[in-house]
Image (cartoon, coloured by chain):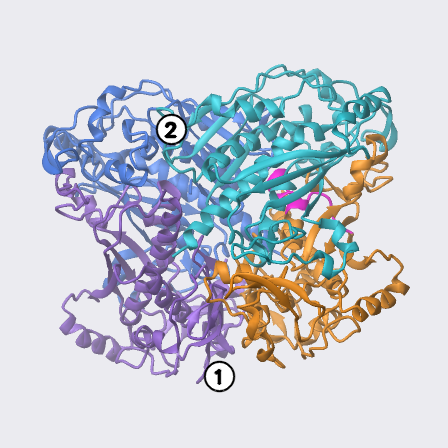
Chain colours: A purple, B blue, C cyan, D orange
Amino acid sequence: MNSFGRLFRISIFGESHGEAVGVTLDGVPAGLELDETSFEKDLGRRKSGKRGTTPRKESDTPHLLTGVFNGRTTGAPLTILFHNENTLSGDYKNLITHPRPSHSDWVAIQKFRGFADYRGGGHFSGRLTLGLVAAGVVAKKILGGKIRIESRILEIDNCNNPDDFPKVIEAALRSQDSVGGIVECTATGVPHSLGEPFFDSAESVISHLFFSIPAVKGVEFGAGFEAARMRGSEHNDPIISPDGTTATNNAGGITGGITNGNPVVARVVVKPTSSISSPQITLNTETGKPEELKIKGRHDACIALRAPVVVEAAMAIALCDLTLIAKSQRP
Amino acid sequence: MNSFGRLFRISIFGESHGEAVGVTLDGVPAGLELDETSFEKDLGRRKSGKRGTTPRKESDTPHLLTGVFNGRTTGAPLTILFHNENTLSGDYKNLITHPRPSHSDWVAIQKFRGFADYRGGGHFSGRLTLGLVAAGVVAKKILGGKIRIESRILEIDNCNNPDDFPKVIEAALRSQDSVGGIVECTATGVPHSLGEPFFDSAESVISHLFFSIPAVKGVEFGAGFEAARMRGSEHNDPIISPDGTTATNNAGGITGGITNGNPVVARVVVKPTSSISSPQITLNTETGKPEELKIKGRHDACIALRAPVVVEAAMAIALCDLTLIAKSQRP
Amino acid sequence: MNSFGRLFRISIFGESHGEAVGVTLDGVPAGLELDETSFEKDLGRRKSGKRGTTPRKESDTPHLLTGVFNGRTTGAPLTILFHNENTLSGDYKNLITHPRPSHSDWVAIQKFRGFADYRGGGHFSGRLTLGLVAAGVVAKKILGGKIRIESRILEIDNCNNPDDFPKVIEAALRSQDSVGGIVECTATGVPHSLGEPFFDSAESVISHLFFSIPAVKGVEFGAGFEAARMRGSEHNDPIISPDGTTATNNAGGITGGITNGNPVVARVVVKPTSSISSPQITLNTETGKPEELKIKGRHDACIALRAPVVVEAAMAIALCDLTLIAKSQRP
Amino acid sequence: MNSFGRLFRISIFGESHGEAVGVTLDGVPAGLELDETSFEKDLGRRKSGKRGTTPRKESDTPHLLTGVFNGRTTGAPLTILFHNENTLSGDYKNLITHPRPSHSDWVAIQKFRGFADYRGGGHFSGRLTLGLVAAGVVAKKILGGKIRIESRILEIDNCNNPDDFPKVIEAALRSQDSVGGIVECTATGVPHSLGEPFFDSAESVISHLFFSIPAVKGVEFGAGFEAARMRGSEHNDPIISPDGTTATNNAGGITGGITNGNPVVARVVVKPTSSISSPQITLNTETGKPEELKIKGRHDACIALRAPVVVEAAMAIALCDLTLIAKSQRP
């Protein structure tokens, strides 16, 4: 399904090289100030153009189609469109006969029996994350000033010094290759009691959204996978204050599936961009035999560079839904 | 919410030291052979009693309350109960005044304003995973023989030699401590085209269920977090056959959110058991000051030991729902 | 699906002549006083035994299996069971070969391919409404004292004088026949702003639940079908007070899909009991030819008599979910 | 919520005098032929311009924004926009101070705390049914040729002779008033086994959608409210053929909540248009006192005239979702 959320529901639609991509938000409270400038900062952070990101340039101007009146949300569904520009469809014609390794090309052909819009990845394109980022902007507004969500790149291609990231990316570009990375997202000021035991645990809901982001292949909270190498005596977070503050935060702010008042800390891994310029082996669907493929065109050498604001948006959307649900549960 | 799934929906209920825990399954096709013996193998694998697991013994006999007639499923909701026995409620009285670190005690008090059944963790107890395992048994039956799901422990407390795991656990027990681990789950024979782009990506749905399992703090697919240290040329999986087979499987069988016909491979990290016998610091909720807590009673030194069958069940439940959805999409 | 509701979710299960029928409620706030006596009044109203209702007697004692601790709800899923007694399965053996007209027998055979529990209607039985009534009791508690929900029988077999209903039913019994009726349900004290434009209009949600009640074949609000015979000048409800009070209530308390602060008034029609003692024509599924059927056993001559408390419960469940949703929407 | 459906999900958005109204459809199979002409017939039937409908003229051209490629559906979300033209916002300024009786004006002010777009009813406008009709066109395509859905007006203002309807409407117009009506919708060729016992009974799902249509205040199936005046011996439908055909169809094609293979027959009542030209009493929200209101502008004297195609669309949407669900249930 193209939608997610129980009270704050987000639905995305569109294709990379079609007319537009967009998002409809349901459950947005009436009265929030919102216009196109509200999105500038976060959309700017997502933009390509930096070294290591695709040179395709889009103005990425959000068009507030419905749900806003006199500069404020109306409470009705909020639809935001991003019209596509600068589409070079000629680049993508052979995706059908030569599905790119680790891309959606092959599964799209199978699942949609040859009818999918293949141009630029179509509906599978990372361009659809424009809708996620726009939804994140609205979610952050709903959450208000007390909850602060921030993301940063922890690691790229084995390097964890941000000052060295440009060098790492240059090296990848030189070898016509791509690199992956790890993004950490922290939400502070999150009240306790968000989330439910089991199926709607805060981790379940947040990870559901994180794994919706193209190229994310792992999600962890708090100590995460390191917990496998810790003893209970180390990993347990001693509660030291009546407000639930813990001395350590190996739980990443979530115990028993419920936020515990400490910062929610999550990390995601973003795989190296699947589109690389160096030659690769893939199937020729006409001959049924593998052969060499050389991908032309524009790609990010490291999509992790553009991921932090998308990850933040996903966190904001998840916390927004959980917050509205928790509100309905208070006496 | 206590339920999950769009076509195959599972709802769990119950408390560790109440009368029973259980599960209701909706969307089970009519005509499957099912009786209490169908659950023996998987419930046996979940059982405690091994070294490193709690000495609390339960018969864990499933009671098929509804939805089965003459030894076959009827198509109506299938409710399975597990009556609790051997409950020693005296052990748990001070969980209110001294919430155990990294347990659900403190959040349960907050979220349910003092009304939660605190005995043995109440509704948050790992005992609720009996319902998950039972649901997994039914899900595996629905998936049929072609899809095979298997789990194994990859690592415990930094050790990845299965032969050495008993020693590792003995050491933890001696130091009145607990250890975590990593479980890998592999599903082979999974057809392509399960899952949707974005919000119902196969990864989103599977991770949603994995993070419902108590103590799981991280989930990764294929190369997972290692992808951050790989180049695109290494990570990309060359497609080498018309059926979608890839030379490597760094994607863990899922590209663009959709299964690609290769084995689905996922790993979860299980944190060290929060209940440890050695003294810890926690809040005294009456004085509002931290003080030393010594937890008595029965606990697993390593819950990861009992996790594989639960992880398998979660995978089976997710794949079952995705399979039914995909079935509705075929022409 | 066997479940309904976004924040207050009710799931039912069970069979008429199986071991039990029951219900699980999710989203019940913690701290409500609840024990078996809380259900006595409403379950008593649903009971058979009156003239015109089936002579099958059941104690209908609710068993609070989970979600209650020390006489209060815990916030965890609340499961209530009703064990079946007094089941005479011998009565129902020929439902397979001779599906009763206007009963679920034939569709149950088709949909569940012969595997449904056919005894006494199985999962389709009116006995499942025990779960609805129990859920209604909890919903009314959540709604609190301000909202009052009441139902009454308006009409039975063309007669609208309650004093004459016994005569009408006697007449039907004498002719080995059954009669239908109309039930009106009124909720007063309902605040404005419940419901959403379009798909979750208050009418949509309430009617969804009303049509879940076996034998309901029509639902109307306010003037209902009479509106087809009214002019706008007659049907329109003049607003006469700042609290939204209208001079008339032809809208039945709902405009634009949203409650308007006036009493919510709905009517449902309950068809005559399908089981009648006089001979009928039905299919012999073995010969494929129609033939005469004479139904033996116990039946209600007028199920409408037992419907008011079920209709009330459905109204309460709907208003409870809408109330929790509206709560999340307030600033 | 602005969305409905489990496998075929429809989401609507937009405002009467904003930029556009529209719909996103999720779960549309890939490969259906679809272009703007596919919608002409049904949109034409919904159009105003006939005597008795508002003289506001719109071209109502659907704009296929996403989900279609090379003239066929892609399997990705299908978004259809209708840009608004010919909006005269000046007409609607006093809706805030003088909410129109039986309109959404007053509840919109309350629910959205003064922030709703009030122009022409905003998001509550009947114009949003363009999205329903467009969704109905796609649903009918998915259902294929075997299922035929047709609607007709049974009654307007007490008159049930279609030839006399123009006279009836003229009379209403002359007295500056409006009239209501009853629409019957019949679906033939519907296979058995659609729908579920209880909460997703075919009646529940269909009525949920019918009551989403503005001005619908009652829904009945088969004999409907007449069932209250029938004996069981009259109302019961004898099954006379192995395919489930019944001699009569008082059940309206649905027994036990499940379609039984006979035509699905439903009727809805459409209230008289709330906007009438003759003076009415309403609240002056500034003084808090009732006073006379005279509504200017363009309105339908009888919205029932435009309802048949909308009712058909709702039926098609419901049957489409139920059909996809049933497909997933077959062995």
**Is residue A205 in sight in this rendering?**
yes
State which chain disc 2 sits on: C
Which secondary structure lies at badge 2?
strand
**Rendered position, A68 above or below C218:** below
Query: Left or right: where does residue A257 sit relative to residue D121?
Result: left
Q: Which residues are magenta?
A: D189-204
Q: Do labels 2 and 1 touch, CB within 8 Å?
A: no
**Is residue C6 in sight in this rendering?**
no
Query: Left or right: where does residue D198 sit relative to residue B225?
Result: right
Which secondary structure lies at badge 1?
helix
Instruction: Compare residues D181 and C86 and report the one nearer the observer.
Output: D181
Which of label 2 and label 1 is nearer to you? 2
Disc 1 target residue: A90
Badge 2: residue crowd in 10 Å (few <14, some 14–19, many ≥20): some
Residue A207 x/y as whole percent: 34, 53
**Quick one: quadrant of the C terminus of chain D?**
top right
Residue C78 x/y as whole percent: 44, 32
Q: What residue is at 60 percent from the left and 47 percent from the top?
A: D328
Tell whether position D191 is magenta: yes
Tell whether position B292 is magenta: no
> Of the numbered discs in the image, which one, if any, rests on residue C72?
2
Residue A247 x/y as whole percent: 12, 46
Q: Evaluate whether label 2 is on the same chain as label 1.
A: no
Query: Left or right: where does residue A149 sit relative to residue D19?
Result: left
Instruction: Compare residues C107 and C87 and report the one nearer the observer.
Output: C87
Q: Amino acid at mark 1?
A: Gly
